[in-house]
Image (cartoon, rainbow, N blue to C red):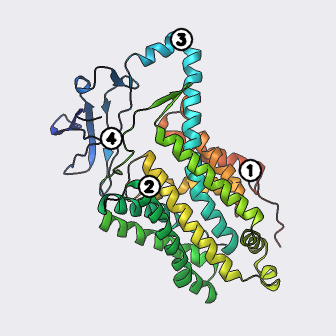
Amino acid sequence: MNGAKVAVTTEGGQPVKEVATNAQGTWDVQVDKPGKYQVTLDVSSLPPNSEVRGGTNVRTPTVYEGNCSTVLFALQPKGAANQQQGDGGGGSTFWAQAAQLTFEGLNLGLIIALAALGLSLIYGTTGLTNFAHGELVTLGAILAYAFNIGMGLHLIPAAVIAVAVAAVLGYLQDRLFWGQLRRRGTGTIAMMIISIGVALFLRYVFLIFFGGQTEAYAQYTAQPGIQVGPISAAPKNFVAMGIELTVLIIVGIALLRTRTGKAARAVADNPALAASSGINVDRVIRIIWTFGGAIAALAGIMLGLSQNLKYTMGQDILLLIFAGVTLGGLGTAFGALVGSLVVGLFIQVSTLWVPPELKSVGALAVLIIVLLVRPQGILGRRERIG
């Protein structure tokens, strides 16, 4: 919404700045130093039929050096909370919240699954634990932003071009860098450490060119929510989930039915045996890197749609991506999907019982518990070592 007034003060009450939201409902305040601030939304500036969800119009974010802090005020029709309580008491409200959080968990889980799918395929075919995969997610979001805002393209063609460019960059990344390291006989541990360096390098390249501020796409940023049963969400969320499911299904069918997919699974099972059977292992790995880069870019674009863009967005979900891959079973594409959905669902639904600040910790606790019972992951296979 446009014209809502937001006031920012220091923790001690000193005024910093008062701004109004733009047509997309976003706002931005630059602060001189890191620390804790108080952000207050002027409820009198809201439309007469709107109110802040949760009843509080004050947020107290902490701003760190070189990073942005995102503050969100969720709005709802006036009286919606009272109507939910009147329709069935506390039990009805609990189940409505559970349904809403389940939907949000599925949305998050599908985004994580897109990113985890490429990471799992790369690990399965090369044995590389790529800590720079989160930066591939960020790259897709920033490329789409550059085509959307910088070149004035609508977000849909901008996203298509960004995914295509990310696919080419994924191919070149293996052709010019990782493939060379494999040919030199670099071990997987050394390559994993190199990937950490690549992640740090790319992160600060993004900081130089994109900046430390939080940005948003030109389209689909502020959409009025629609009510589907107990679930309230913006139309873009339903469309995004449809796209994510479609892509995951297509990739799954390709792995099962196409010649390249069968070759990729053969390389993941036993690269030496696959090579002796006439499969061009390097070619298969480059195809995996190409599609892995494209899928990671799409995950970044979807993540940018559900929240604002920043140069650390891939880093922020990297741990959840690894959790999804490990929980589902390292190197298994379908395991990455199942594990990511479990992680996404638990993160959101767990906020019914635990503070939101601990929701990611709870997801990792589930990861540890499952791996204690099933070390190979949900869909992983037992392997004998030695």
Task: Residue at the far bottom: name it.
Answer: 184
Q: Which residue is mark 3?
A: 87
Q: Which residue is mark 4?
A: 61
Residue 284: quarter of image: bottom right
Q: Is residue 204 visible?
A: yes
**Badge 3 vs badge 2, beta-carbon distance below 8 Å:** no
Q: Is residue 350 visible?
A: no
- Name which of mark 3 and mark 4 comes first in the sequence: 4
Give the Cα distance between marks 1 and 4.
36 Å
- Name which of mark 3 and mark 2 comes first in the sequence: 3
**Badge 3 vs badge 4, beta-carbon distance below 8 Å:** no
- Name which of mark 1 and mark 2 comes first in the sequence: 2
Secondary structure under tag 2 reads helix
| Nearest-to-viewer mark from 3 and 4 | 3
Residue at 58% x, 77% y: name it.
191
**Badge 4 vs badge 2, beta-carbon distance below 8 Å:** no
Residue at 61% x, 40% y: name it.
345
Secondary structure under tag 3 reads loop
Residue 274: quarter of image: bottom right
Marker disc for residue 372 = 1
Which sits in the foreground, 366 or 109? Answer: 109
Q: Is residue 81 left or right of residue 210?
A: right
Marker disc for residue 156 = 2
